[in-house]
Image: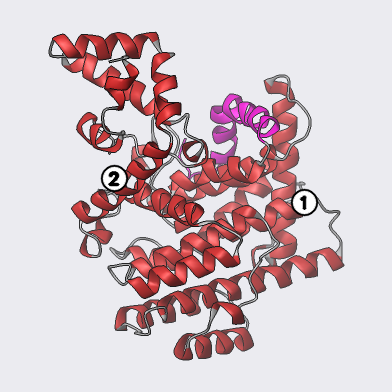
Amino acid sequence: MDPGSKGWLKEYLEFRLKLLQELTAEGRKSSHPDHSLYRVIQPTGIMYGQPVNVFDHPNSSEWNEKDRMKILLAESLISSSLLFHDKPVKNTDEMSVVALKTLESITNFYNHVFPELSTSTKTIFGRKKTSLELAEKILDKRIEHTTENKGNFWTQFFHNSLLFLDIFIFGQWIHTNADKIVSDFFKYEREELRTSLVKIMAAAAHANHILEFEERRLMEYFLQSAQLSPAKRKECQTIFEEGISIEEINLPTNNSWLLKKYFLEIAVLTIWADKKVEDLELSFLKRLAETFSFSEDDLDNSMVAIEGFVLEHWEELSALQDKKKFEEVSDQYIKRVSKITDKNRSRLIKEIQESEDLMALLIRARSAELNDEEKQKLRVLLIDVMKAIPTFVIISLPQRFLTLPILMQILPKNFITESLGD
């Protein structure tokens, strides 16, 4: 499959059909489809405009950034639809029907809400295009409007993270009967959400009462790429220059958990552009979280999610290395996750005691040195145990970063001894 060639969407669906079917079952099991969608898309990087984690396709290493972004956008839009699908999908034939209907919805969505991307339904010879052809063309056009990595994480983050708003608005769109009034509403919402995003970034940039040169330059870049109306752009420019308080922003306090999570994490990353989270900035993040009815634990979870994402993809995000030293991010992450595991000590002990393989390895490790294969198996099993913690049902763990020595730092002190009954 080559995402840059004609027919890529058909090949993608054929490759992913079985896994997409399993996603509909996950959506029915979850009490919060928003949580399931977050778990699907957050590790990919699309929320932050960084297409770093694409599914395991044999040719994926050959894809450029725009190719990866295109695949992730398609996957995220389809996942958004499937997680809210309320009927069981029994086999791949039924899944094919559902997928084609989803593609029709994607095409209608972009044609109505993003008129600048509208695509003709017929070829130059008058043949009616298929759902696959239309959706593929419109996704190609959408990705043409994104920016490529030119060695700057932040410019890419500001521009391409807007793709998440496509996914969020589409999740609302599929539950409506599209007419002109509905289309106008979603076009209005598209601009309002982008404006709210700029306001949150501006408030975060002013949180320490110092507007850095870099923050100013990056915000100007974002305003140029956000496709706001001239009036909205002027409003946002003034807000960025003068600052804005949380209370002055029309935030979605009663809206989707996922949208509020996105806004919170964008604020966290904006503050990260200033290299360190200072006390004033942390206070700002706590007030923003409270405005969204999030607890401090929810804020910590977002910090854990972002730090875990950065640590897992440190090499791919090389432009970040001037901003946050690896050891600094690593230490912060270990401290945060250690607090979470300590709170869940009893749950972890129970999970270990219920795993025969894990108990056997731990007992063996007390009397002999484990070989490399056994150490790797122990590492994987301990990560699986951590996934039983509610926080990590929603947040993905950075698998490559979590080596056995780091796991020993993260897991509660003496809890393995307690698990063995000593």
For the residue carrying disc 2, how many other residues have a C-alpha within 10 Å: few (<14), some (14-19), or many (20+)? many
- In the displayed structure, would residue 355 be above or below residue 389? above
Task: Check whether the beta carbons of the residues at disc 1 and disc 2 lie within 8 A of each other.
Answer: no
Q: Which amino acid does the dot numbered 2 rest on?
A: Ile
Which span of residues is magenta-colored? 1-30
**In the image, is 390 to the left or to the right of 21?**
left
Farthest residue, direction left: 369
Residue marked by disc 2: 334
| Residue that mark 1 sits on | 126
Rendered residue at 15%/9% (across/down): 367
Question: Image height check: is 145 above or below 226?
Answer: above
Q: Is residue 60 left or right of residue 247?
A: left
* Nearer-N-terminus badge (1/2): 1
Toward the viewer: 400 or 254?
254
Q: Give coordinates of residue 113: x percent, y percent.
A: 71, 64
**Secondary structure type for disc 1:** loop
Determine the residue positioned at 49% across, 79% down. 223
